[in-house]
Image: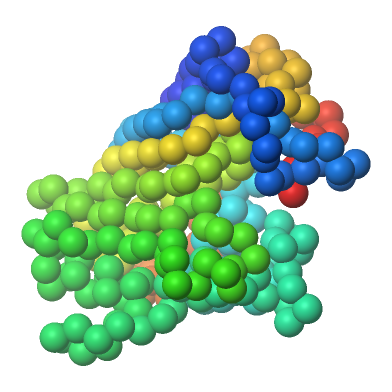
Amino acid sequence: MSRADELYRATCLDILENGVYDTELQVRPKWSDGTPAHTVKKFGVVNRYDLKEEFPIMTLRRTYWKSAIDEILWIWQKKSNRIAELGSHVWDEWAGPDGTIGKAYGYQLGVKHRYPEGEFDQVDRVLYDLKHNPASRRIMTNIYNHADLNEMNLAPCAYSMTFNVTGNTLNAILNQRSQDMLTANNWNVCQYAALVHMIAQVSGLQAGELVHVIADCHIYDRHVELVKRMLDNPMYDAPKFEIDPAVTDFYAFTKDSFKMVDYQWNKFDFEIPIAI
């Protein structure tokens, strides 16, 4: 069975059995009918995925991994905040009149900063350091820019990556302030696992461990029964993940540079209400 399934199932069961409901608090998200979207949550969840063992895609339900990778390329490669440049519609409801999501996500990664070696944005600084200074303990990105929060249509959920080289292995920590377990968890895990594979390959390294740190890990109240039903599904083995070995430039990857061989998943035919 997929290790991602095991971790996902264990996390959801912990939330359902030991989590705390926020029904006594005022919350920002609402359902489409205007009702407050409350959650049951656990604080400080940490899941570790060994990318040398398998790609962490779940089989309890389908993860649309190509769309997930397309979004991570939109953020990290295109450094875009314009939804017309994204292949899916996951950001449509957050777009402003100008067709962007404000100064969020890709915009922040594309801002250049001056260093002794020259000007770099955050992505290019990571790529530079992994090639020229792999022993550094400062190879990281952070897009939670307080100065620009009032110009972001949504404050970043997954906001920081820390990269660390051990031997010839690239490990990474993904920090996330908030995680909707039903709709977003494995989507984020897959896209950042793919990102580690991409950056490792163009840096002459092997992808190692992805550590996912979630501050507020929650299940929305109207998702609880859906999650319970999904956890009863059988689990399959993880598919084989393939990345085009000919790509040596991070900016040359496309969503078609990857394959999931023999990916099996369970059907999930329930309509999922979305909190906004």
Above or below for 252 versus 204: below
Horizontal and vertical percent for residue 16? 59, 15
Above or below for 61 versus 149: above
Horizontal and vertical percent for residue 203? 24, 65
Q: Nearer the viewer, residue 25 or 137?
A: 25
Residue lying farthest right?
Answer: 33
Left or right: residue 274 compared with residue 236: right
Image coloring type: rainbow
Q: Nearer the viewer, residue 219 or 244?
A: 219
Horizontal and vertical percent for residue 85? 66, 75
Number of numbered discs visible in the structure rendering: 0
Q: Which residue corresponds to the image point at 71% horizontal and 21% vertical from the top-left? A: 224
Left or right: residue 43 compared with residue 222: left
Residue 236 in sight: no
Q: Which residue corresponds to the image point at 22% horizontal and 74% vertical from the top-left? A: 128
Left or right: residue 146 compared with residue 162: right
Q: Which residue corresponds to the image point at 35% horizontal and 71% vertical from the top-left? A: 123
Above or below for 260 versus 2: below
User: Quadrant location of residue 201?
Assistant: bottom left
Residue 160 in sight: yes
Q: Which residue corresponds to the image point at 60% horizontal and 48% vertical from the top-left? A: 65
Horizontal and vertical percent for residue 53? 34, 33
Q: Nearer the viewer, residue 11 or 205?
A: 11
Residue lying farthest bottom?
Answer: 118
User: Quadrant location of residue 27?
Assistant: top right
